[in-house]
Image: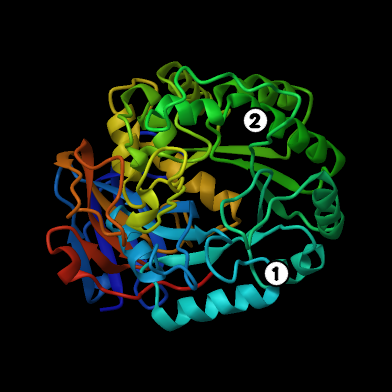
Amino acid sequence: MTKQILLAPLAILPGKDQPQPTTIEIDLDSGVITSIKEGLVRPTEEDGDVMVIEIEEGKVVLPGLVDTHVHLNQPGRTEWEGFQTGTLAAISGGVTTVIDMPLNSIPPTTTLEGLKVKRAEAEKVGVNCDIGFWGGIIPGNADELVGMLDQGVKGFKCFLIESGVDEFPCVGEKDLIKACEALKDTNALILFHAELDSTAHTHASPPSPDPKEYSTFLASRPESWEVDALSLILKLARRYPSLRFHIVHLSAASALPSIRQARAEGVKNLTIETCFHYLCLTAEEIPDNATQFKCCPPIRNSSNRLELRQALIDGEIDYVVSDHSPCVPELKKGDFLESWGGISGLGLGLSLLWTEFQQDEKVDLGRVVDWMGSAQAKQVELEDKGGLKVGNKADWVLFDPKKQWEVTTQSLLFKNKISPYIGKTLSGLVEKTYLRGQLVWDHAKGVEGVNFSQGSLL
């Protein structure tokens, strides 16, 4: 059969917050959506030999989701994660496209050669969803950037503070000006880990100097670092209006007034993301030595969480990502100051956000799908992803919004089963994930039912 027809009583279509009855026709040879009709339109004899999938009442058809912030760490640190395990976790949560960060692989994706090595490795081992790549900006690599852009990287990540790995050093203003000058004839996207340890600030002394206590770590990464970083980023955004600037994993709500003001003054080339963990977790709930909660910038208090949440609803924050940043268990041992900073959550995002927002009258399922789909596809210029529309790739997801389930180590499919979400009960379960019309994940069958390595390199 070369044609698939979905009869979906509930489907989320572009621009619609509420699901509606929809008939979707897919050409399986090309893996593309060829027709979308309102209502349930059963095939006729003229349609020929078709595969009809009748969606059960109560289940919702969504577009395949996008996660533009993951660290898959292959090659070089595949004991932390890898292309196979990371993309398997992705499809289990309805994510059909990921964009891989330029670190913590060895080599990092900071040269054209490093990009070639990473692409070759992904092709060799296979990927379970589609995957694109970010490049990186480090001191001295400005001459590499245009070449990487020509070879398909989606943009460039940099750090304004030490990254935690030696092969990806942070940059200063002079390095950034060199990079922006190299890229100024493009519309490249530059991503910032936006923490800047400005010596002008005196650090608040922690309530307790005990490194076992989360408050000690939280005080060591103050919100002022994010506010100071934003000042530098806005300076660059104004100087280089043809380039696009983006703040990854915003955690400090105190940066929001400056973002509002800059946009009101006409800055149009700045976008913002936040993460599931900043919207779903709070500093107050983190026990001593619970280093599975440690990330940089840190999870902050409950009032900060509510401000971020409102900024997302109001459209001041553009979308939400996992920032899946795993490591081996040994690196999570010890206290909050010495352990690795990174949270693992790839594949859990849709359930996390739906659990968080399902009771909010301002947020329907379509809005959550926008934050996790179309907004991110648009950001990385994947025009045929992120929505159920004619001409798009037939990446789709079957979602049960009412199903409750518990996150366990067994349910986690990424390599190292360390996560702050273990033990949490979530609402909404991805039952099936399709990539270009092909079933790749079926929750009922688990890993045994996976159609492996159907993903493509973007």
- In x, y percent, where is residue 43? 23, 63
Please give the name of the residue rendered at 44% of the width and 64% of the height, measured from the top-left corner. 393
Above or below for 351 versus 36: above
Along the horizontal axis of the image, is 189 left or right of 20? right
Please give the name of the residue rendered at 36% of the width and 52% of the height, measured from the top-left corner. 346
* Image quarter of the C terminus: bottom right
Secondary structure, mark 2, is: helix
Above or below for 175 versus 209: below
Between 204 and 228, which is closer to the camera in this rendering? 204
Between 184 and 73, which is closer to the camera in this rendering? 73
Colour scheme in use: rainbow
Q: Do we see residue 19 in this rendering? A: no
Q: What amino acid is at disc 2?
A: Trp
Q: Quadrant of residue 136?
A: bottom right
Along the horizontal axis of the image, is 80 left or right of 358? right
Secondary structure, mark 1, is: helix
Quick one: label 1, few (<14), some, or many (20+) residues within 10 Å? many
Please give the name of the residue rendered at 71% of the width and 29% of the height, measured from the top-left corner. 228
- In x, y percent, where is residue 155? 66, 57
Above or below for 218 versus 348: above
* Image quarter of the N terminus: bottom left
- The residue to which callout 1 is attached is 148
* Disc number lying in front (1 or 2): 2
- In x, y percent, where is residue 232? 77, 35
Q: Which mark is residue 225?
A: 2
